[in-house]
Each structure stands twice: as C-alpha cells, then as structure tokens.
Image: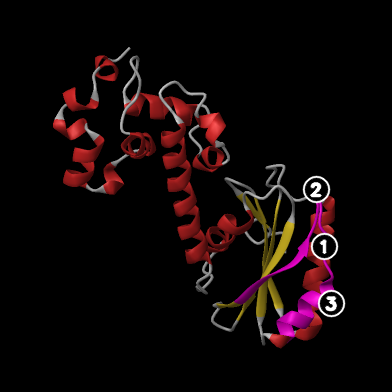
Amino acid sequence: MNKTTNLSIKQWKQDDRPREKMLSKGKQSLSDAELIAILIGSGNQQESAVGLSKRILASVNNNLNELANLSILDLMKFKGIGEAKAISIITAIALGKRTQLEIAMINPKIKSSKSVYNIMQPIIGNLMHEEFWVLFLNNANKVIYKEMVSKGGITSTLVDIRTLYKKAVVYLATGIVVCHNHPSGKNYPSEQDIKLTKKIKKAGITLDIKLLDHLIITKTAYYSFADDSKL
C-alpha cells in the first residue's frame, strides 16, 4: 500500500492536499476522488479521505452518474461515512444535477449529436422509464423549444407522429431532432426504433420539416442515427 494512503491529509505534501491544491491550482486540477474528499473532510483509521473516496468511486466503476444513484444508506455502508457525510455527498451531486438541468433549459445552437446529448442526458439519461422528446429547430439550427411527446414503460414508448409534427408547425420549426432514452443502458437501436425513425423522416418530407437526427440516450453514452448514416 502507498505510504501516502496511511497518512492523514495534514501530513501530506502541501501540493497533494485537496484543499490546498484547489487554492493553488484551481478546481480543475482535482480528481473526482479529491473533490469528494473535500466534502467528507476525513477518512477512517485505515485510509485517508482521498483513499476512502477512491474506494467509493471504485464501487460504482468511477462513474459519477452511478454514484448519484446511491442512497444515504448505501453510502453509510462504507466505514468512515456517517449520515452527515453521506448527506454532504448527495447534496453536492444534487446541486450538480440541478446546474446541468439549468444549462439544458437554455436554447442553444445544435452543432453536433454531442450537443444534443449534452442537452438531453441530464433530463432523460438517468430515468428508469422511457421518454421520447423532440427538439424543434429554426433555420440556424437553434433550439426554439423542446418537449416530451411520449412517456412509456421500462422498454418502450409510443409516439404519435401526427401530434409531433402538429407541434413542429405551431413552433414554426424547419427541422427537428428526436431522442429517447434506454433505461437498459443499451445505446443501439431496436427494430422498432429504426422503423419509427423512418416514419418520422417520411412524414416530415411532406411538410418540408427535416429530421436532422434521432438519438438514443443512456446514462453514459448515446447512439446517433445521423452519425451512423442511418437517416
């Protein structure tokens, strides 16, 4: 075991201490474990706050989205994490997610499938049921409005294409991007997804409203019909 792990944070070199590191080098210099270590303040007799934080992250494969799904009781299973520390971690994650949602509510310009993912992942990426959303765009590919048009179960959701395009006409959209989530975590299209995409594209041709992309979104990844040349 690394000798540094057995030392209290106060005994570490100043550059290695999370708080001091943030002050001298900025928040971007800290790892996820170091940020969590600042939240919890101390570890236990066997490991430092950073060591404990690394172990917590390892339990969720170093995935912050998975960490966000842990409950207070889940966190308290780790030695050195009491109720107060568990609440601190969950509070910080909740604030981060609210920040993501606020950013997602801004109407940005769509430049790529990644920009769609960045908008929609905080909204639907972690849901346990499927939702189908549409981003209505103007000539400059700027989002005029975004709206959920269907909500389903764990494995599927039904979409009324007529209602979808009725809304597009109301918003004077010249293009749309559709997206839905896969709670299963599988970021590739089903046969039903492929058929639905073709129907949406065909219906838009008559109205001169272009389907620019269809994204399937999961907690950590996405699939783009446009990127895969499936439109």
Q: CA distance from mark 1 to mark 2?
A: 15 Å
Q: Residue at x 36, y 24 (%)?
A: 51
Examine the rendered structure and indicate whether residue 146 appears above or below residue 116.
below
Can residue 60 be seen here? no
10 Å crowding of disc 1: few (<14), some (14-19), many (20+): some
Of 104 and 19, the residue lying toward us = 19
Give the extent of the magenta segment: 145-169
Of callouts 3 and 1, which one flags the residue occurring earlier in the amino acid sequence?
3
Residue labelled with disc 2 = 155
Which one is nearer the viewer's eye here, 82 or 208?
Answer: 82
Q: How is the image coloured?
A: secondary structure
What residue is pinned by disc 1?
A: 196
Residue in view at x 52 percent, y 27 percent? 59
Is residue 151 located in the magenta-colored stretch of the structure? yes
- Amino acid at circle 2: Thr
Residue 212 percent coordinates (x, y): 66, 70
